Image: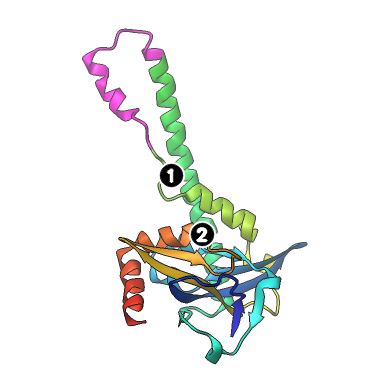
Amino acid sequence: MLTLKLRTRNVKGLLFWEPYIRLSYGIGWRKYDMLVDVGLSEKTSCGYFKILLSRKLSIKLLTDIPKSFVRGYIQEPLKTDAETILGELLNYAKILHFESKRLTRKISDYAKKLHLWSKYMAYPVDEGAKWILKILRPQKFDKQGIFMVKALLNEGFGINEKTSREQIKLFKDAGSIIYCPFYVIPKKERIVFYDGTESTPKENVIYTRFINSSDDLKNYIEGILRKI
C-alpha cells in the first residue's frame, strides 16, 4: 500500500487514510506530479473541492507498507482511472473560465454604477435615488471562490481553458493510488482534520472546512468515529 509517510505521533484521534490518485504528466517542457483526492471529494457534488484538496507529491514522503500493518481507517478510492480525473480537470478549466468571465462582467457593471453614483452625489439626494443605494450595497461576487480555484488549476496543474488532452503526456507513474494520513478529532460541534505528514500536529484547515461545510460529509465521518 503506497502512502505518504506518517510523521505525526501521539495524537489522540482516529487515524484516517485518505486516497489520492497520482497524476504525473508533462505539458510541453513542464512536468507535474500531483495528488488528487479521490475519496471524500467524490462524496460531494461540487467538483471544485477536488482541486482545493489536491497537493504536490513529495517523493521523500512516499513509502510502501503492507496493508495489514496499517492501523486506523482506510477510505476506499471512489475513482481509480487517471484519464477520467484528467478529463474532469480539463472540463473544470472550461467551466471556470466561463464563470470567471460572467463574474468579471458583473463586477464591471457594478463598477460603472459606482462611477455614475459618484457623479450623482454632487447633487442633493432625493427619495427617487434610494433604489440606487440598494443596488450599490457592498456585494460579495465570488462566493464560490471561482477566481481562486481557476488560479490553482492553472498554477498547480498547468491546466487552463486552452489546454487540450493532446498537449498532455501522462507518465507511467500516473494512476497510482497513494494514501495520506490524517488524524480526525471531534471538537464540540466540529470535525477537525490534522495532517499526519507534518512533524508536529497541525490542522489541515481546508479539509476541516470541507468536512464541516456539508452535513452529509460530517455525518459520514461521525458514523466512522462511532464504529471505531
Q: Nearer the viewer, residue 104 or 224?
A: 224
Whether 130 is among the magenta residues is yes
**Any part of residue 125 in sight:** yes
Whether 81 is among the magenta residues is no
Q: In this view, does 45 lie to the left or right of 170?
A: left
Instruction: Give the quadrant of the C terminus.
Output: bottom left
Residue in the picture at 65% in, 80% down:
63
Vertical placement of residue 170 versus 200, above or below: below
Q: What residue type is labelled 1?
A: Asp
x and y, in percent, of residue 149 in the image: 52, 53
Name which of mark 1 and mark 2 comes first in the sequence: 2
Residue in the picture at 63% in, 71% down:
23
- The residue where tag 1 is placed is 142
Callout count: 2
- Report helix, strand or loop for mark 1: loop
x and y, in percent, of residue 152 in the image: 57, 54
Q: Nearer the viewer, residue 183 or 85?
A: 183
- The residue where tag 2 is placed is 52
Cα distance in 3D space between marks 1 and 2:
16 Å
Q: What residue type is labelled 2?
A: Leu
The label nearer to you, 1 versus 2, is 2
Q: Give the range drawn in magenta.
A: 119-139
